[in-house]
Amino acid sequence: MEKERITVEELLRRYAASERGFQNIILEYADLSGVELQNIDLTEAQFNYVNLSGLNLYRCELRGANFLNLFCWLPHA
């Protein structure tokens, strides 16, 4: 299956419209900090240079997803 390049704005717009299937997407140079993406399918998705700090991926499918050059701040416990 061919990958679909999307922007963070498109991802959030489609998610807000109740879409949950985002298999094979490519998301680059994006800021997803503090975003909630629950029950989303990101199978085979590719994330390049994405800020994931505080991202909520509760009950998400991430099988085969690639995460390259990410920023992710984790608070001290």
Image (cartoon, helix red, strand yellow):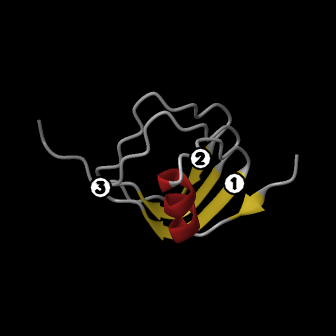
The residue most toward the front is 17
Q: Quadrant of residue 62?
A: top right
Q: Nearer the viewer, residue 69 or 54?
A: 54
Residues under labels 1 and 3: Cα distance? 20 Å
- Where 2 sits versus 39, above or below? below
How packed is label 3: few (under 14 Cα within 10 Å), some, or many (20 or more)? few
Whole-percent x, y for residue 17 in the image: 53, 53
Q: Nearer the viewer, residue 69 or 14?
A: 14
Quickly name the residue at label 1: 25
Whole-percent x, y for residue 5 in the image: 71, 65
Q: Which mark lies nearer to you, 3 or 2? A: 2
Task: Please give the name of the residue rendered at 24% of the width and 47% of the height, measured from the top-left corner.
Answer: 74
Amino acid type for the residue under numbered disc 1: Ile
The residue most toward the top is 59
Task: Please give the name of the residue rendered at 71% of the width and 41% of the height, measured from the top-left corner.
Answer: 44
Q: Nearer the viewer, residue 76 or 39?
A: 39
Quickly name the residue at label 2: 19
Quickly name the residue at label 3: 34
Whole-percent x, y for residue 48 in the image: 58, 62
Q: Quadrant of the C terminus?
A: top left
Is residue 21 in sight in this rendering?
yes
On the picture, is 4 further left or further right than 49? right
Provide the secondary structure element on which disc 1 rests: strand
The earlier-in-sequence mark between 3 and 2 is: 2
Amino acid type for the residue under numbered disc 2: Glu
